[in-house]
Amino acid sequence: MTSNSPAPAQASGPQGSQVLAGLRDSLGVGIGIFPLGFALGVLVIQAGLPWWLAPALSIGIFAGSVELFMVSMLAAATPLLTIAVTVFAMNFRHVFYALSFPLQRVKRGLPRAYSVYALIDEAYATYVLMPAQKLTSRRIVTGQLAMQTYWVSGGIVGVLVAGALPEPIEGFEFALVALFIVMTLDAIRGRREIPSAVLAGLSVGIAILVIPDQALLAALVLYAVLLTLRFALGSRARKHENAGEDFDD
Amino acid sequence: MIDPLYLITAVVISGLITLALRALPFAILKPLRKSRFVKALGRWMPAGILLILAVVVLRGEILSRPGDLWAIAAATAVTVLVHLLAKRRALLSIAAGTACYVLLLNMF
């Protein structure tokens, strides 16, 4: 869609190269997204749900971990209110993505609307770690469109394969676990990330012990609180030192 | 047979909640983007949020298969080792970890 729109590219480089850059960006995570979509398709069939639920989830919701969780909730005929609350809790982290996702690089209108709708963990992780000056609207939206394509097609292939299998195969859901482990390893690469990782580990540990039923939401809230404290203590220390503006960026 | 209307309603409700959570903060946060506090949070949050997600899904897997703790530990170790040793190729690490898990669960 983006490749033949007549609008000029926002930053350097011809439009085609931006589309290629977006496709390249999507490959790293896409290779993780496709098997995950495949796992979703397999789980839909193995849970006894209709095949069209796989693409319906990937287009209607487009949030990997929630979709996989939805399959088990729908198979158990979970009440709609419970589903709504669970989805809210599980996806609440997206509120924090707005703080740092380079949405200002995406053109207003349809591209920006799509970019917000398709702001999955993988898209966030891919583009938040890149220098914003290097990003163009075309590149980000192409990357996101490609990610959704991997996800939807993975689901359809999963549905087809599961339908052809004589017996269910267990353990596909580990793709989700592996995906988050890999993304965490990539996010925590330098010493600079260690304080954040320690605070996050503390948050999730406390959340699991204290509110095991809402551990994800509790951990995210606690983490936000701890980061706020970190900022407050840091700016007090800076005032004491009375040092210049050498805030690392 | 599960009522298709129930499935569709569930997908629509969940989709709208997800979209609202993704869109509203952008509308509300616009004036805040220049603040130092918001910038610091934006810089600190990604690594921590991903770590929290990893721990939570790992715990979910342990809760849903409490008898297969050893398989979960082995598959996690394989994922981490392959990722660190094979130059951080996400494809390879995820495929190796998942394949290891599927094999262990279905063969033992």
Image: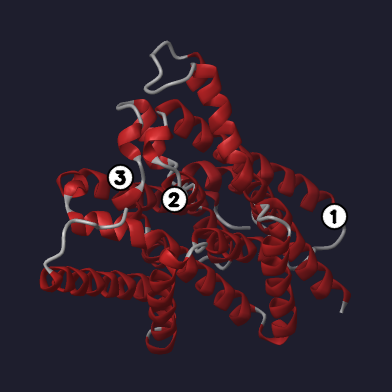
Instruction: Say whether residue A42 is left or right of residue A74.
Output: right
- Give percent across and percent down for residue A169: 80, 64
Where does label 1 land, which residue?
A: A165
Dot 3: element:
helix
Q: Residues within 10 Å of mark 1 (few under 14, many from 20)?
A: few
Of residues A148 and A206, the one drawn nearer to the viewer in this rendering: A206
- Give percent across and percent down for residue A13: 47, 20
Gap between marks 3 and 2 measured at Cα: 21 Å
Where does label 3 land, which residue?
A: B23
Q: Amino acid at mark 1?
A: Leu
- Give percent across and percent down for residue B10: 45, 54
Residue A81 quadrant: bottom left
Q: Are marks 1 and 2 in contact (CB under 8 Å)?
A: no
Count of labels in the image = 3
Instruction: Say whether residue A125 is left or right of residue A32.
Output: left
Residue at mark 3 shares a chain with residue at mark 2 = yes
Q: Along the polypeptide, which appears first: circle 3 or circle 2? A: 2
Instruction: Say whether residue A78 is left or right of residue A172.
Output: left
Gap between marks 3 and 1 measured at Cα: 40 Å
User: Where A211 sits versus A221, above or below?
Assistant: below
Residue B44 quadrant: bottom left
Subunit ID for the residue under disc 3:
B
Which residue sits at x=48%, y=51%?
A125
Subunit ID for the residue under disc 1:
A
Q: Amino acid at mark 2?
A: Thr
Dot 2: element:
helix
Of residues A196 and A120, the one drawn nearer to the viewer in this rendering: A196
Where does label 2 land, which residue?
A: B9
